[in-house]
Structure formats: C-alpha cells, structure tokens
Image (cartoon, grey):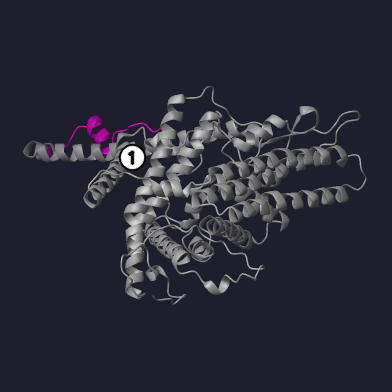
Amino acid sequence: MTTAEPPKELRHRNNKALPSDELSDQVVSPGNVQEDELRQWKEHAQRVKVKVLEQVQDHLSDILDEALTESVQPFTHIQPTINGKMTKKTSARSQKMDDGKVFMERPSLLDELFEISHIRTIYHMFIAVLLIFCLSTLAVDFIDQGRLVLEFDLLFFAFGKLGTVIQAWVVMFLYTLLVPYYTLVFWASLYHMLPSKLGLSLGTGLILSIAQTCVLGLFPIYVVVENQLPPASRFIVILEQIRFVMKSYSFMRETAPVIMKNTPKEGKGPIIPPFSSYLYFLFCPTLIYRESYPRNNHIRWNYVGSTLAMIFGCLFYGYFILVRLCVPVFRPETNQPFSIRTMVLAIFHSILPGIMLLLLCFFAFLHCWLNLFGELLRFADRMFYKDWWNSTSFANYYRTWNVVVHDWLYYYGYRDFLWLSKRKFRAAAMLSVFIVSAVVHEYALTMGLGFFYPVMFCLFAVFGVVFNFTMNDKRQSPVFNVIMWACLFLGQGVQVCLYCQEWYAQIHCPRKEFLGAGDASVLVLQLPQVKLPVSCSGRIMDRGMKR
C-alpha cells in the first residue's frame, strides 16, 4: 500500500538550514512560500489518493472474482456420473461449451430498485396516470350519458370463453406432463440393452415428434379457430402452447445426454429424473430444466398479494390505454380517405400508447407474473430480466429484455448450432436464432389477432438483425441509448398503428373473394363481429377499398 511521503524539497528544507539570501526572501514574502508548500502538499495528497483508490479497487475486484468463482465452481466444473460420484470435466474448451445455465439465489432487479425512494416515485407516477385515466373515463361517460358509468366491456370481450381455454390448457398440460416423461423412461430402459441404439433413438424421436405435432401443434390451432376465441383467450392458448413445447424440449435435451453417457451397472436401471422434479419444472418460471433449483425458505404472502394486485392493475391499465388512446384514433366517426398524412399522423399518435403497452407488458409478465409463480414455488433465482433500459446497443437489449427466453434460445439454438458446426459460422448461428424468434413472435400475433400481417416479422427479422450487427456492444456512448429508445418508440408506434388499422379492416372490410363457400382448402380465421360504429377508413392502402 502506498504511504504518504512529503516532497523531497520539503524534506531538504527541514534537514538543512536555509541560506541567508533565501532566508531574507522568506522573511520578505512568507505568504508566497506557505502557498507554494500548501499547493505542493495538495498535489501530493491527490496523487496518493488516486494510487490508494486504484490499489483498493484492484484488490477488491480480485477478492470478488475469486469469491464468485469459488461459489459457481461446484455447479460448473463438475458433472454427475454413475452412483452419484462427481468427476471434473476434461478441458477448459469443452467446459466452456458444455456448461449450462447456473441458477443462484438473486432477486428481481425492479424489487431492488423499488427500495430506492427515487425509483419508487416513478412507480407512483404510473399509478397516478392510471387514476387519471379512470377519472377521465368517468368524466367523459358522465358528460355523454349523464351518469357515472365504468364499464369494462372490452375486457369481458377479450377474455371470453374461458371455459374452452381451460379445457384446452388441461389437455396440453396432461400431455406435456405424461407423454414426454414416460417416453424418456421407455427409451432409457432400452437404450443400453439394445444393440441398435441409433435406430431406437430415431424411432422414439419420430413417434414423439408426431405426437408433439398433433397435440401441441395442431390441437391448439384447432381450438382457437374452431371456437372463434376472442383475442386474449387466443393468446393464452397459443402462449401456453409455445411454453409447453419449449419446456418439453428442454427436459428431453437436458436428460437424454446424461442417460446416454452413464451406463448403468448390472442389475440396476438407468438414472432417470424424478417425476416430481419434472412436475415442478412445468410450473417454475424458467425454460431450462434442472433436477433442483435454489429455493427460498418460506413464501411471502404479502408479496404474493401485492403482486396479484399489480397484475390486475396492469389489466385495467391496458384497458384504459386502448379505450382512451387507441380506439378514438382508429375509430373515426366519418369516412376519411387514405393518405400519407393520415398514416404518418396515426403512427405518431400511436407512439405513446405503443411504448406504454410495451412497458406494461414487460412489468405485468416479466416482473409480476413470473415473480408471482417464483414466490409461490419458492423459486429463488428471480433474474428474469436485466437492466435493458440502460442498453446502448440492440445486441445488449435483446440479451437483457427477456432473460428467460434468451437463455433457451442461447443454449438450445445458438450454442447447439455452434456445437454442430464445430464453432464455425457464428453469424449464421445468430441469424438463425433471430429468424426462429421472429417466426414464433409472428405466429403468436397471427393466431392471437386472427390475421396474418407480418409487421412484427419484418421489424424483428429485418431491422432487428441490422440493428443487432450495427449497434453492437462496442457502442458505449449514452447517445446510443437515446437512439435505442427512439427506435423502440418508433417501432411500437408502427406496430400499434398498423395492427389496429388491420384489425378494424378485417372486421368491417373483409376480403369477400377469399370467403368462397366451396373453397375448403382455404383456412379463414374469422374474427368476432364486435358491434362498434367504425368505418372502412382504417383500411390500409394495399387493400385500396373506399366507401
């Protein structure tokens, strides 16, 4: 550690008598000498301070790195073998490739930030805006109808036919719970006994793929289309379909290699994960399977109650955003011909509701919903997202916005692609992950809204890829954070504008040439006929229909 030493000229001044001429100068102007000495002492103290802080920071960083390495090492540097014994991995290269996600006890970032009064004030501001929305709706209803009316007809319409949704969910859940697990048990019991391991694996995988396609692929689509479910109910069925597919794949992907590597001893069966761990995995807020996760000691029921209240608050918040900010813009009372001016104005009018809906979906699902299940199941690893709002690059934004889905895409998409290509074609691996994610997002929106209009796919697969490679992690200036937010604002405005226009266009200006009664080969996703006094002015230019 560096210690404070006086400057050399000051030591000489103390050890050696001053000459007569210097002494006379000091007597003449003692104030100047004292100012010089004070300035030198300050400069020297500042240099010592900088050196001490650098040494303390380096030492503290080394201590934290060592502590983190020691804490993670039991999970990442060992792997199970026969009879529960643990063996170290072979090389650093294979270790880097084979290591999976490490779960550890950590809270959600917003829970930590809400402990700060300044951040909590921002949360209070959003609550105040919700109250203003409620008051404005009451005031408008009182002026128009002469009485206080607070109807939530849009919510009741969006979440209609919940009985059908529950029945479809039960079917998908029971299938995901039983079929993949017992298929794995059957395959594992025969894998080390039969000589043709490849034939057994291919046959079992083919049968399971057919079953997955029928039950988790076609069945939800049939339920959505045949029963003409409203939008929110559609999204529940489709998102649960995607979740069950990703969960079952993770379970098979994590357990099958372990069974293949570990040959059981004579008289003993293969090591199969317990059924209870798989059941817990189907409900816990993660898409990466492990036999055990870090768990909390108890359930904080106050936290559960407040989280439920926030979820219901987010539902009402979304309702007021749509009713007060979206419907008046896209449901004009008079017919207006399409023009570039009206489209541009509609996009900019949609920026505010678009970004509010984005923040609302993030807070409602990634924070409240996942933390609710995490608390009920005592799931301790709550890092469902990171500080994506501070991102200066879209590459970092994609990694931190939704950590749960990003982990699944990284370990089972990007990293497996690199493993198959022997660590070549990194750009192709990243591009393939983007394409898969864009297709799934567009599939969810298509089935949820009831029409195919690939706005999300174009923004994600085209602009998202371009921004990912251009605005990469090398961009560290705060200016790029401003650019990222500006792109998010504009992108959300475009999506809200175009999807709302197409929603009204599909209802009030259907393309009748596609609705031939004898054409059974065309699958038409008919929308519920909502009784709203809207015109065809929301029809976009490519349809060219005017009334």
| Residue at the top extreme, as displayed | 297
Tell me the quadrant of the picture where the C terminus can be found: bottom left
Residue marked by disc 1: 123
Residue 361 position in % (x across, y down): 44, 47
- In this rendered view, identify the residue nearer to me: 544 or 446: 544
Residue 355 position in % (x across, y down): 38, 54
Residue 81 highlighted magenta (yes or no): no
**Which quarter of the picture shows residue 351?**
bottom left
Residue 137 in the image: above or below residue 225 = above
Q: Is residue 56 visible?
A: no
Q: Is residue 34 visible?
A: yes
Say what amino acid the circle numbered 1 marks.
Answer: Tyr
Residue 17 highlighted magenta (yes or no): yes
| Secondary structure state at the residue bearing disc 1 | helix
Q: Residue at x 48, y 33 (%)?
A: 107
- In this rendered view, identify the residue nearer to me: 161 or 23: 161
Tell me the quadrant of the picture where the N terminus can be found: top left
Compared across the picture, whether 311 is left or right of 92 comes to left
Callout 1 crowding tier (Cα within 10 Å): few <14, some 14–19, many ≥20: few
Q: Residue at x 24, y 38 (%)?
A: 42
Q: Residue at x 61, y 49 (%)?
A: 242
Q: Which residues are magenta?
A: 1-21
- In this rendered view, identify the residue nearer to me: 374 or 79: 374
Residue 222 in the image: above or below residue 193 = below
Compared across the picture, whether 496 is left or right of 43 comes to right
| Residue at the left extreme, as displayed | 28
Residue 505 position in % (x across, y down): 44, 67
Residue 241 position in % (x across, y down): 62, 48
Compared across the picture, whether 417 is left or right of 543 comes to right
- In this rendered view, identify the residue nearer to me: 408 or 375: 375
